[in-house]
Amino acid sequence: MDNFDYSAIGQRIKTLRKRKGLNQTELAQQLNKSLRTVQKYETGEIEVSIAVVNQIADLLESTPTYILGYDASNTQIKSLADIMDFLFKLETVTGIDFKIDVQKPPRSKQWECSISFDGKSASDFNADMCLFLEQWKEQLDDLRTYGETRKAYHKWQEQTLAYYAATSVKCDDPKDLDEQTRIEKRNEYLTKVYETPNP
């Protein structure tokens, strides 16, 4: 969890602990940790694991994302353009590879479009995306079929965001190729796609 400011995390834990009316010893007992460990959490001397952050969030009636200082985007979705803009941003993330699949009549009975991530690809984050989407589907299905409360669903969201907040990504806008290089690359691609193997 290298992307976090542990002294800031410790300060937030301390503030929440005091707001709850607990001293360090009481928090240590509830966490089943030593007093010295809690003191080190609060001073930022040691890393707080995600499991402990989740535990502290429950005990101090907060959220893991608040404790970690992860600021989810406050940008509200007001139009379809906001959603499309987010999807355009996906193509700039280094380490994520996705494909867009379109099925529509007359080749298909349905008109369906999807974005998919190959979890077995060499891309750095595709497996994480597949794992997240699998868990999201299960959680959302449970919520929509009344098998889970909205509160439990939000708790899962918070814990998921907190877990991945430490994984930084790099975004790069692909550079424009000169016309000759673009044509060469296009020809290479077409040759690869339409080349028939020799028997």
Image (cartoon, rainbow, N blue to C red):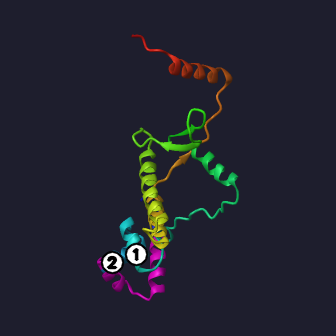
Which residue lies under the disc numbered 2? Answer: 31
Which residue lies under the disc numbered 1? Answer: 56
Distance Cα–Cα, label 1 vs label 2: 7 Å
Towards the viewer: 25 or 142 = 142
Q: On the rendered image, what quadrant is the N terminus found in?
A: bottom left
| Location of residue 88 in the rendering, given as x and y in whole percent from the top left corner | 63, 45
| Location of residue 113 in the rendering, given as x and y in whole percent from the top left corner | 57, 43
Question: Residue at (62%, 51%) from the top-left corner?
Answer: 86
Callout 1 crowding tier (Cα within 10 Å): few <14, some 14–19, many ≥20:
many
Callout 2 crowding tier (Cα within 10 Å): few <14, some 14–19, many ≥20:
some
| Location of residue 109 in the rendering, given as x and y in whole percent from the top left corner | 56, 39
Taking the magenta stretch, the answer to whether it contains residue 20 is yes
Decide whether the magenta segment is chiefly helix, strand or loop.
Answer: helix
Is residue 94 visible in the rendered image? The answer is no
Tag 1 and tag 2, C-beta contact below 8 Å: yes
Badge 1 amino acid = Ile
Q: On the rendered image, what quadrant is the C terminus found in?
A: top left
The magenta segment: 9-34
Label 2 element class: helix
Vertical order, 153 against 16 (above or below): above
Taking the magenta stretch, the answer to whether it contains residue 188 is no
In the rendered image, the residue lying farthest to the bottom is 21
Question: Residue at (52%, 64%) from the top-left corner?
Answer: 70
Question: Residue at (41%, 46%) from the top-left corner?
Answer: 127
- Report the number of numbered marks: 2
Label 1 element class: helix
Vertical order, 92 against 37 (above or below): above
Is residue 9 visible in the rendered image? The answer is yes
Badge 2 amino acid = Leu
